[in-house]
Image (cartoon, rainbow, N blue to C red):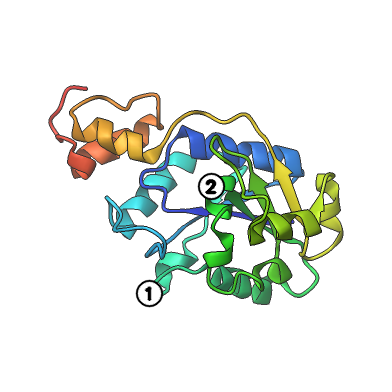
Amino acid sequence: MHVIYGGTFDPIHHGHLRLALEISDRLGVDQVSLVPCHIPPHRGDTGATSEQRLKLLELAVTGEVQLRVDERELRRAGASYTADTLRQLRQELGPEAPLAMVVGTDAFAGFDRWREWRQIPELAHVIVVRRPGPGLDPDGEPARMLAERAVRDASRLHDQPGGLMLELDPPLLDISATGIRERIGDGRSPRYLLPDPVWQEIRRLGLYGACPDGNF
């Protein structure tokens, strides 16, 4: 099964990486593909450019065989839409290959505002990762879709190309990219929240307000 985990990764941190490994282990797949978006349609500008975020991702996964970077959305012009990415992957993998995408409950709560949201489960399975927060509106479209398509056994996802939804509640590291950017901007060290090579590159490039010559 081919599994993708998309996001801005602005910057990539240990919370992202640990979740991706949990997904790989729980689904019994050899690799999870991290897919950085080019222009996120549901948020403002990123703190780092697409090329800079890609470099940080590559540094973060170096030597980790269970994770890889898929830069396809960075090569496309315009906003990054999940349906377009899944459609492209489906063409590459063929109609019968199991394909799955990962999304947190915070993002999935607004799933019915995504472009072509009803077509997405026809292209791939959807893995919904529970995150802290209010959860889904039980009367909303995303909750109804999840209830209709939900399975409890992750092995079911290997048996068909797409169409199923699986909720997972893995242990999550309480780390946010927003918090890291704010910490750097305030002149505080984000070390141990993200891989050291990523922090070194952030400092070298002066991203998020980092001082290249800083001592922390």
Name the image quarter holding the N terminus.
Answer: bottom right
In percent of width and height, residue 102 lies at 62, 52
In-image side of 196 versus 2 (left or right): left
Task: Please give the residue where the numbered disc 2 appears in the rendered image.
Answer: 106
Question: Which residue is at the far front?
Answer: 139
Q: How many numbered tags mark residues here?
A: 2
Give whichever of 63, 91 is nearer the camera.
Answer: 91
Type of amino acid under label 2: Asp
In percent of width and height, residue 57 lies at 42, 47
Type of amino acid under label 1: Gly
Q: Residue at x 67, y 50 (%)?
A: 138
The 10 Å Cα crowd at callout 1, few under 14, some 14 to 19, many 20 or more, is few
Res 157 quadrant in image: bottom right
Q: Residue at x 57, y 31 (%)?
A: 172
Whether residue 66 is visible, yes or no, is yes
The 10 Å Cα crowd at callout 2, few under 14, some 14 to 19, many 20 or more, is some
In-image side of 57 versus 139 (left or right): left
In percent of width and height, residue 19 lies at 58, 38
In percent of width and height, residue 50 lies at 33, 59
Residue 187, placed above or below residue 67: above
Structural distance between the alpha carbons of marks 2 and 1: 24 Å
Give whichever of 2, 209 is nearer the camera.
Answer: 209
Secondary structure type for disc 1: loop
Task: Please give the residue where the numbered disc 1 appears in the rendered image.
Answer: 78
- Mark toward the viewer: 2 or 1: 2
In-image side of 28 versus 6 (left or right): right
Q: Residue at x 74, y 49 (%)?
A: 166
Nearer-N-terminus badge (2/1): 1
Q: Residue at x 26, y 30 (%)?
A: 183
Whether residue 34 is visible, yes or no, is no
